[in-house]
Image: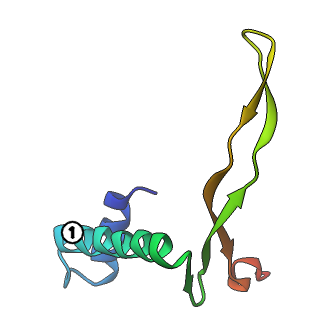
Amino acid sequence: MTKKKLAARVSEASGGKIAKTEAYELIRELFDILVEGILRHGRVQVSGFGTFTVKTRKAKKGMDLKRMKAITIPERRVVVFKPSKTFYREG
């Protein structure tokens, strides 16, 4: 689902009280705040939804298949999402 489609759903769910453009701006701002929180604090937890955390992946050895040479893939930071238990409910 894109931000545009999400904004349309929010507008629809509000019964038209929130315009699509306003919903889109709210969603864009929400994602900006989430990204800022993840970068600044390394973790953002949204109750009933899940937790975003920053993990460091260790450097590892890989293979350049074009030249058939061993290479080192550098250490890097990645964002990991762990969904809350509400995602695993039966029903």
Figure quadrant of residue 27? bottom left
Residue 55 is left or right of residue 2, and the answer is: right
In this rendered view, identify the residue nearer to me: 70 or 32: 70
Residue 64 is left or right of residue 38, and the answer is: right
Tell me where residue 3 appears, x and y as whole percent: 36, 60
Tell me where residue 30 appears, x and y as whole percent: 35, 75
Tell me where residue 89 appears, x and y as whole percent: 76, 83
Q: How is the image coloured?
A: rainbow
In this rendered view, identify the residue nearer to me: 89 or 26: 26
Residue drawn where x is 70% and y is 77% of the image? 87
Figure quadrant of residue 47? bottom right
Q: Residues within 10 Å of mark 1 (few under 14, many from 20)?
A: some
- Provide the residue designation for mark 1: 20
Figure quadrant of residue 80? bottom right
Residue drawn where x is 45% and y is 75% of the image? 40
In this rendered view, identify the residue nearer to me: 47 or 87: 47
Residue that sits furthest to the bottom in the current view: 47
Residue drawn where x is 36% and y is 76% of the image? 33
Residue drawn where x is 75% and y is 45% of the image? 59
Quarter of the image with the C terminus is: bottom right
Q: Is residue 6 above or below residue 34?
A: above
Q: Is residue 76 above or below residue 54?
A: above
Residue 71 is left or right of residue 79, and the answer is: right
Helix, strand or loop at label 1? It is helix
Residue kind at label 1, given as amino acid type:
Lys
